[in-house]
Image (cartoon, rainbow, N blue to C red):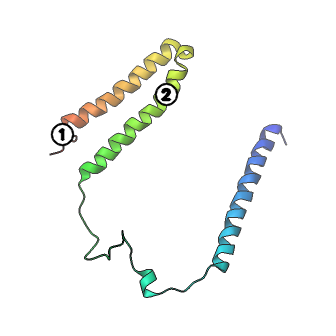
Amino acid sequence: MSPYFESYLTVGAFAALGAVLVLAMLGVAAVLRPAKPSKTKNMTYECGVDPVGSGWSQTYVRYYVFGLLFVIFDVEAVFIFPWAIQAEQLGVFGLVAMILFMLTLLEGLAYAVKKGVLKWV
């Protein structure tokens, strides 16, 4: 076997050992834990207040869009920081690629503004 695949074999062995240990600990916990269910233990608990009424409530899609925009611009930061560290070595090609990336994100932001997604009212 080549040394290249031997390193993968080591990683696989450690992953398998980790999975076996997790399963063993879960098994030990299942055997040793006390199990005395009661009505009070099975009741839903939320902030010390007994739940009243149904748990269904409608949420606005707008909040989902805000979360999605946050994730998009958070991912942008994940790409910009390494680029900033290696900007000198990447040269003009790296600069042009990052400008195109930022323009693509700005286009998405402009589209969201145009559609009125970012209005709070």
Question: Which label sits on residue 116?
Answer: 1
| 15 sits to left or right of 37 | right
Residue occupying image coordinates x 31% and y 28%: 106
Dot 2: few (<14), some (14–19), or many (≥20) neighbours within 10 Å? few
Q: Residue furthest left?
A: 121
List x then y, in percent, for residue 53: 25, 76
Dot 1: few (<14), some (14–19), or many (≥20) neighbours within 10 Å? few
Residue occupying image coordinates x 41% and y 37%: 74
Are the residues at dot 2 and dot 1 in contact (C-beta closer than 8 Å)?
no
| 50 sits to left or right of 39 | left
Amino acid type at image mark 1? Gly
List x then y, in percent, for residue 43: 40, 80
| 16 sits to left or right of 115 | right
For residue 105, what is the image quadrant? top left
Q: Residue furthest top?
A: 92
Label 2 or label 1, whichever lies nearer to me, is: 2
Question: Which label sits on residue 81?
Answer: 2
92 up-or-down from 30: above or below: above
List x then y, in percent, for residue 76: 42, 32
> Viewer-proximal residue, 104 or 30?
30
The N terminus - image quarter: top right
61 up-or-down from 94: above or below: below
**Mark pair 2, 1: CA separation:** 30 Å
Looking at marks 2 and 1 on the same chain, the residue that comes earlier in the sequence is marked by 2
Residue occupying image coordinates x 26% and y 74%: 54
List x then y, in percent, for residue 20: 72, 63
Q: Secondary structure at mark 2?
A: helix
Residue occupying image coordinates x 49% and y 18%: 94
> Viewer-proximal residue, 37 or 103?
37
Question: Which label sits on residue 49?
Answer: none
Amino acid type at image mark 2? Phe
Q: Secondary structure at mark 1?
A: loop
